[in-house]
Image (tube, rainbow, N blue to C red):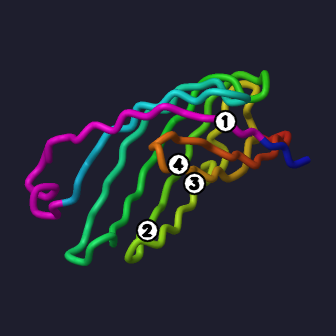
Amino acid sequence: MKEHATGSFDVKITAQKHDSQIARAANFDRRTIDKRFHGPLEATGKGEMIATSTEVKESAAYVALERVSGRLNGRSGSFVLQHMAIMNRGKPQMTVTVVPDSGSGELRGLTGAMTITVGPDGAHSYDFSYSLEARKD
């Protein structure tokens, strides 16, 4: 059965130094994600992001993995989100999906996708459509 959770979150993105010769040669931006979700999802998110921009203004992309730990509508556990986003001359396309079989604790069997919105004032919010299905191990 599909369930739904919406709320806000605070996020701190911190630039990281290139830690290898290959990373320096690729010249991608590497950042950490430190997030606090509020609402039906009361949790922290910790992750890493790799981003790039182009010579064309407002064209860029990022990928990230984020481990979310806390409570989702009263159920405790953790899960991993995979982010993939492209900005094509100012037009965003983003998918944020639960990594299959990444749920733990009472969130085992979690599947779903999250939409992230950034308001004109910079406030962040999420809209999470998910299902909790019994895993067959």
Camera-side mark, 1 or 4: 4
In the image, which residues are magenta? 5-27
> Is residue 17 shown above or below 38?
below
Q: Earlier in the sequence, mark 3 or mark 4?
A: 3
Cβ atoms at labels 3 and 4 below 8 Å apart: no
Q: Residue at x 43, y 34 (%)?
A: 11
CA–CA distance between discs 1 and 2? 23 Å
The residue beneath circle 4 is 119
What secondary structure is found at the residue carrying circle 3?
strand
The residue beneath circle 2 is 86
Camera-side mark, 3 or 1: 1
Report the label total: 4
The residue beneath circle 1 is 7
CA–CA distance between discs 4 and 2? 18 Å
Q: At label 4, which amino acid type do we have?
A: Gly
Q: Quadrant of residue 135?
A: top right
